[in-house]
Image: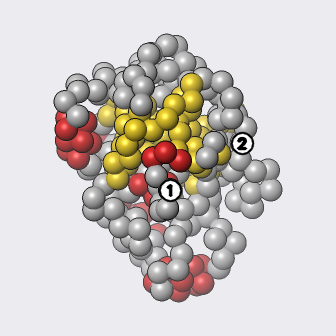
């Protein structure tokens, strides 16, 4: 899809033939799980397909579009606490996939899923839960917020280097919704449940879908989960910011799903600063 012309992408999108899930870390840097201990690898039949964020001792938050028929929870697993998606850490089975009931595969609206794991996580220096931004923090997200996106996705739009074997990250900047809507005005609506971020030469891409967009307010050393990698056109393209599912807009849904299991499963989160 990343190789299509803008006119063709627009035409096919309106015909319902294109799902613009082009998300990988482009223009980023290698890192380790110690710097991003909340990072998870979502795997289908033991192959990395998406990222995710640990948000509690039983829960990983990711994107709804990572899960399609005919696959079931038995086909998926989650690796946590590992710098490499193929080895290390802990590979856990999935008890239940809870996709947002209003998820729309055509518009990518409400692109969010909560995974209930079959085991309780034990936190270490390589495995920590991430705090979630709240609905009241919507206005706190500005171009001054330090944002980081991480994952194992492709490292270039052409994909010649393949999926990264080690964890990578990129720092990006918040793009105001009005500007993002203008960029995608001929493609798809950017809804209230989405947010945008970009930086010249850096972006998320294929294989990073579902991964965390973590923000630090100026002067703070404790990051919060603001977004989940969702969709976009191409990777690190100047004209098209990356589009993320807004955790703030869907925080009520997340809390309701966690609460439905009778657990106080959300933690205060990891305190640390990527640099």
For mark 2, give the secondary structure. Answer: loop
- Residue 138's place in the image compared with 84, above or below, is below
Residue depicted at x 27% and y 58%: 101
Q: Nearer the viewer, residue 217 or 94?
A: 94
| Location of mark 2 (residue) | 164
- Disc 1 crowd rating (10 Å Cα; few below 14, some 14-19, many 20+) is few
Look at the image and tell me whether residue 149 can be seen: no
Please name whichever residue, 259 or 150, is drawn nearer the observer in this view of the structure.
Answer: 259
Q: Residue 181 falls in which quadrant of the image?
A: bottom left
User: Is 33 left, or right, of 115 in this rendering?
Assistant: right
> For the point 61% across and 64% down, which residue is it?
234
The furthest residue to the top: 124
- Judge by depth and name the residue closer to the eye, 8 or 209: 209
Residue 27 percent across, percent down from the top left = 68, 46
Q: CA distance from mark 2 to mark 1?
A: 24 Å
Q: Earlier in the sequence, mark 2 or mark 1?
A: 1
- The image shows residue 160 at horizontal and vertical percentages of 80, 56
| Quadrant location of the N terminus in the rendered image | bottom right
């Amino acid at each position: 899809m990343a190789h299509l012309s803008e006119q063709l992408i627009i035409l096919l999108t309106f015909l319902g033939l294109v799902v613009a899930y082009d998300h990988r870390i482009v223009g980023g840097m290698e890192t380790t799980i110690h710097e991003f201990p909340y990072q998870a690898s979502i795997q289908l039949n033991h192959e990395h397909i998406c990222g995710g964020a640990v948000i509690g001792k039983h829960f990983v938050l990711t994107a709804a579009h990572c899960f399609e028929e005919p696959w079931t929870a038995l086909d998926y697993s989650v690796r946590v606490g590992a710098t490499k998606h193929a080895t290390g850490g802990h590979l856990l089975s999935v008890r239940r996939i809870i996709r947002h009931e209003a998820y729309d595969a055509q518009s990518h609206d409400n692109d969010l899923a909560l995974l209930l794991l079959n085991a309780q996580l034990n936190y270490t220096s390589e495995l920590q839960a991430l705090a979630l931004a709240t609905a009241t923090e919507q206005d706190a997200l500005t171009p001054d917020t330090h944002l980081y996106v991480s994952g194992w996705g492709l490292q270039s739009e052409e994909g010649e280097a393949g999926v990264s074997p080690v964890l990578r990250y990129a720092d990006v900047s918040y793009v105001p919704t009005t500007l993002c809507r203008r960029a995608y005005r001929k493609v798809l609506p950017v809804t209230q449940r989405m947010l945008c971020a970009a930086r010249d030469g850096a972006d998320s891409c294929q294989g990073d879908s579902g991964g965390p967009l973590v923000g630090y307010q100026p002067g703070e050393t404790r990051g919060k989960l603001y977004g989940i990698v969702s969709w976009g056109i191409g990777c690190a393209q100047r004209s098209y910011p990356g589009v993320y599912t807004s955790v703030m807009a869907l925080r009520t849904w997340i809390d309701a799903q966690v609460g439905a299991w009778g657990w106080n499963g959300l933690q205060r989160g990891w305190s640390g600063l990527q640099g």
